[in-house]
């Protein structure tokens, strides 16, 4: 979640923000679903597995989008999202 929020903010400061649209959008979605999963885990939600599955898919999509850019913040975000997707699969 933190890596996505950092990447989102850094992407908005890049020279060609238009090129970063997909990355920015997925950063937001990924950060939001990660936060939601964190809350679901703390509440012992009965649908935590389903939320974790969705989180894994969104994390993978975000990692893929971030890997398309050479910026350090995008590469760090891609690595964090790949690790998060793996952790979400273990929960699911």
Image: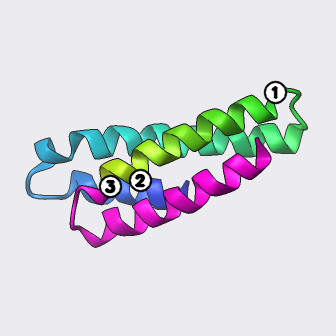
> How many marks overall?
3
Verify CB contact (< 8 Å) between mark 2 and mark 3: yes
* SS for callout 3: helix
Residue 6, horizontal then vertical, whole percent: 41, 60
Residue 54, horizontal then vertical, whole percent: 61, 33
Q: Which residue is mark 3?
A: 66
Q: Which mark is residue 63?
A: 2
Residue 81, horizontal then vertical, whole percent: 50, 56
- 10 Å neighbourhood of mark 2: few (<14), some, or many (≥20)? many
Q: Is residue 67 left or right of residue 79?
A: left
Gap between marks 1 and 2 measured at Cα: 24 Å
Tag 2 or tag 1, which sits nearer the N-term?
Answer: 1
Query: Which stretch appears magenta?
Result: 67-92
Placement of the N terminus among the 4 image quadrants: bottom right
Placement of the C terminus among the 4 image quadrants: top right
Residue visible at 73% across and 46% down in the picture: 38
Q: Is residue 2 visible?
A: no
- 10 Å neighbourhood of mark 1: few (<14), some, or many (≥20)? few
Q: Nearer the viewer, residue 36 or 86?
A: 86
* Residue 72 vertical placement versus 64 (above, below): below
Q: Is residue 41 left or right of residue 18?
A: right
Q: Is residue 86 visible?
A: yes
């Amino acid at each position: 979640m933190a890596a996505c929020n950092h990447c989102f903010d850094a992407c908005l400061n890049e020279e060609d923000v238009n090129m970063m649209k997909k990355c920015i959008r997925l950063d937001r979605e990924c950060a939001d679903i990660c936060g939601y999963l964190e809350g679901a885990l703390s509440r012992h939600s009965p649908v935590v597995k389903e939320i974790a599955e969705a989180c894994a898919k969104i994390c993978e999509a975000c990692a893929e989008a971030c890997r398309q850019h050479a910026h350090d913040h995008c590469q760090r975000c891609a690595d964090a999202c790949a690790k998060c997707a793996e952790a979400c699969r273990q929960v699911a």
